[in-house]
Amino acid sequence: MPRLKPKRIIRSGKPAVCPECGNRKFLIVVYGMPTQKVWDDTGRYDCRGCCLPPFVEVVDHKDGNTYWCEEPKYVCSKKRCSLEVYMRKGAEVMPPIDDSAYFNGHKWASGDFVIQSQQAARLRSKVWKHGGNGEEALQKAFKTRTVRQLHQLQRQLLGGKK
């Protein structure tokens, strides 16, 4: 039987109660090589392996915005529910460009000028659409050194607007 796509929510902190099933117990999601103590404590941790998953889209039902998130921080302990909780702090407003190394904030590589230009042009259009100075936004975008800085600039200029 194929595994169903897990339900996902984005929050600023761990929920007290699962909004899907009412369960009060959440497991901490762990990636990497856990210690034996963590591995054995199945009532507290959900060990998921050594490789991080790709970034996933999570829609915030509060503001309707779509965010791209790294791994979930918590998961509901009920196997039938398995609601994944992502943290707003680690979320990004723009999708990853091509791989997670760029998304996680490494410096622009020499061949990334085209990608940076595309993202800067999108940002300029969004700023114009919301009545801002698109050319100024474009110049600021070209001064960024990482994708994360470009994402922060978008948040600063648009303030959560799409």
Image (cartoon, rainbow, N blue to C red):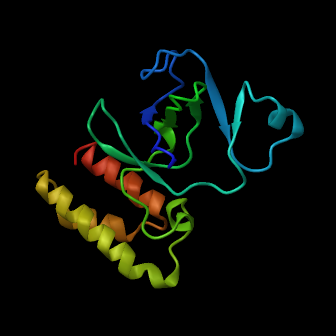
Q: Is 3 on the left or on the right of 20, as rendered?
A: right
Q: Nearer the viewer, residue 6 or 138?
A: 6
Q: Residue 92: horizontal and vertical position, in percent?
A: 42, 50
Residue drawn at (80%, 43%), measured in percent from left and top? 34
Q: Residue 45: horizontal and vertical position, in percent?
A: 71, 32
The picture quadrant where one finds residue 97 is: bottom left
Residue drawn at (19%, 58%), measured in percent from left and top? 126
Q: Nearer the viewer, residue 37 or 130?
A: 37
Q: Is 32 on the left or on the right of 148, as rendered?
A: right
Q: Residue furthest front?
A: 1
Is 123 drawn above or below residue 66 in the view shown? below
Is 48 drawn above or below residue 96 in the view shown? above
Would residue 133 be seen by someone viewing this image from the given angle? Answer: no
Is 22 drawn above or below residue 96 in the view shown? above
Would residue 65 be seen by someone viewing this image from the given angle? Answer: yes
Q: Is 16 on the left or on the right of 65, as rendered?
A: right
Residue drawn at (39%, 55%), measured in percent from left and top? 151
Q: Residue 122: horizontal and vertical position, in percent?
A: 25, 65
Q: Residue 142: horizontal and vertical position, in percent?
A: 36, 71
How many numbered discs sit on the rendered protein?
0
Q: Residue furthest bottom?
A: 111
The picture quadrant where one finds residue 78 is: top right
Is 25 drawn above or below residue 135 in the view shown? above
Residue drawn at (53%, 49%), measured in percent from left and top? 70
